[in-house]
Image: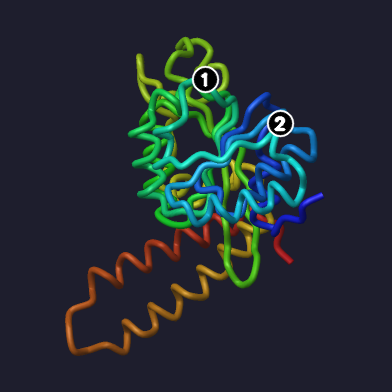
Amino acid sequence: MVQLSRRLQAVADLAGDAEVVADVGTDHGYIPLFLIESGKAGRAIAMDVNEGPLLRAREHIRQYNRQEQIETRLSDGLQELRPGEAQTIVIAGMGGALMTRILIEGGATAHAADCLVLQPQSELPMFRRFLVEHGYRILREDMVYEDGKFYTMMAARWMEADTEDSLRQNWRVAGVGSHVQAMTEAEFRYGPLLLAHKHPILHLYLLRQKEQKAKILESLGENARRDVSTRRAQVIEELEEIEVLLKMYPQE
């Protein structure tokens, strides 16, 4: 069995069982290999925009003798994947802006999937906002800490075709006739399900953020060369928000 890093394992764990899984930006092909070997997928398509990563993926696929089950495909995002061709689509390890572009340009394919497993490396508030404002439901979230870095991953599905009654039964809806999940700024920033489930790694992340922002506030207080009142007010507001969120966790 292929061994995954903590980050990739968390990504793979969010993938539901599928006849076909597509991995966008596959790099070494580890996730398709793991999903095939663990029985969570019958076939896989390992995709990348560059030939180099596909060569590495092919090498690993041959090493595990999975050539008949895993196809490699040169593709910019979802362009070479047909709608409905894969039930699960994994997009991990790239910036939130790039992932947003991939989902916009490959909208028909993304909408047809049963499950999107997404792991943006940056711009998380913007990316979550994009998802909910474009008809996607965030189904699950996870967070891991590995090699000094925090990683957030989520499973989502396009739900625009769902009825209003179905959405109301499962999610808060922002207004009559709207399919947008109503989320607070804190939920966009830190993750609605991570907050709801009081995720332990999110707790660690909030503590780190509190420490970092306190240092920023201290440095701003020492800076008398320019007007930093706006920035100072922003950091104070962010610190107050973190303090409120930390109160959700049991106090030691």
Question: 113 or 130, which is in the foreground?
Answer: 113
Residue 200 location (% of width, % of height): 69, 56
- Name the residue at 36% across, 20% down: 178
Numbered mark located on residue 223 in the image = none
Q: Secondary structure at mark 1?
A: loop
Query: Quadrant location of residue 128?
Result: top left
Residue 42 location (% of width, % of height): 72, 28
Whether residue 95 can be seen here: yes
- Name the residue at 36% across, 85% down: 219
Question: 77 or 139, which is in the foreground?
Answer: 77
| Viewport quadrant of the C terminus | bottom right
Q: Is residue 101 above or below residue 112?
A: below
- Name the residue at 76% across, 56% down: 3
Question: 107 or 173, which is in the foreground?
Answer: 107
Q: Is residue 103 above or below residue 7?
A: above
Tag 2: amino acid: Ala
Residue 206 location (% of width, % of height): 56, 63
Question: 97 or 189, which is in the foreground?
Answer: 97
Q: Residues within 10 Å of mark 1 (few under 14, many from 20)?
A: some
Please give left or right for residue 193 compared with residue 123 in the image: right
Residue on which disc 2 sits: 41
Residue on which disc 1 sits: 84
Question: For the residues marked 2 and 1, what is the alpha-carbon distance in whole angstroms?
Answer: 15 Å
Tag 1: amino acid: Gly
